[in-house]
Amino acid sequence: LLDNACGREYTGRRSLDALDDLIARLATAGMLVMLDMHGYDDTNSAMWCGDPVSGACTAEDEASLFGAWSTVADRYCGSPNVIAADLFNEPYGATWGTGNVSTDWDLAAERLGAHVHAQCPRWLVVVQGIANRGGWCRDHSGYGCWWGEMVIAHRYHPVSLPDPKKLVLSPHAYGANSTWHPYLSASDFPNNMPAIWDAHWGSLPSLTQTAILLGEWGGRMSETGEWQRAMAAYLVQRGIGHFYWSLNDNSYGTLSLIHISEPTR
């Protein structure tokens, strides 16, 4: 049940009922919707199946996520303004391209994406990145990634869907914490950023013919304004779509903590 923290209008209503109402209102306003499976609770889970003790996901572990997407696809595939399914938020503990079905997010995204498309073939399937396991970002730019940013491995180990034209990669990127991301305090900042973004994800559309959508970027302008202006110019120049995090003022985690990402390797 939703409480006052989630909006007084929806107090006492179940989440799906509130979402029904919100999607209907957005349709009336002419706005499209991407549904995002953001997590199992109010924390960022390291893996798409939660935080298993073993650090790996079994079929039993991930069954709840498959079930959740079944529920959502059955409920909203018929809503014309719902156009995309963002499979899971920032599985920063996962690997990519190792061949291990229990830890590889690329393989899990293939399974989940096929599952979603089996129930709603028209939806775009949106796949976020991982963090720093495997060292992919450092190999390409010399720097680590944010949670959800590492999608460059798709160049070598692509996510394969039954309809590849409906695949969208969705990295996340932020502009705070120069301790973990020293490029933010480089002498040529922010002019150094386009080359880093190209290396991490911006080059993928031309290299792989896969669409890119920057799923999260933002912060407080008082703290990251220079970085944000550079990112805005980059996105316009490259023609990359994006979601700004966030327009509402209660995103306590992103704005104050800015993703504790760098230690995950």
Image: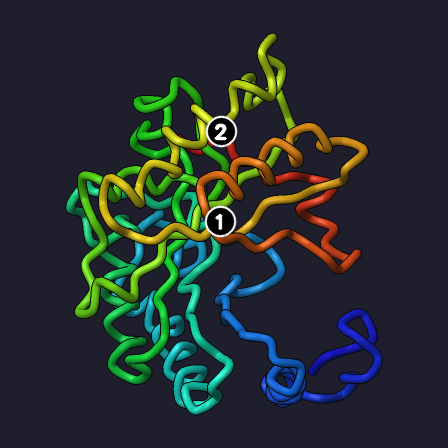
Amino acid type at circle 1 is Leu
Real-space CA distance between mark 1 and mark 2, rounded to the nearest whole angstrom: 22 Å
Mark 1 Cα within 10 Å, few/some/many (few <14, many 20+)?
many
Please name the residue shown 49% across and 49% down the image.
214
Q: Position of residue 86 (x, y in %)?
A: 43, 64
Mark linked to residue 263: 2
Residue that mark 1 sits on: 214
Q: How is the image coloured?
A: rainbow
Percent x, y of residue 79: 48, 88
x and y, in percent, of residue 207 in the image: 24, 39
**Could you tell me residue 21's position as x and y percent?**
66, 88
Q: Is residue 153 left or right of residue 78?
A: left
| Residue at point 43%, 24% (across, down) | 195
**Residue pictured at 39% horizontal, 71% vertical:** 65
Three-letter code, disc 2: Pro
Residue 52 picture quarter: bottom left
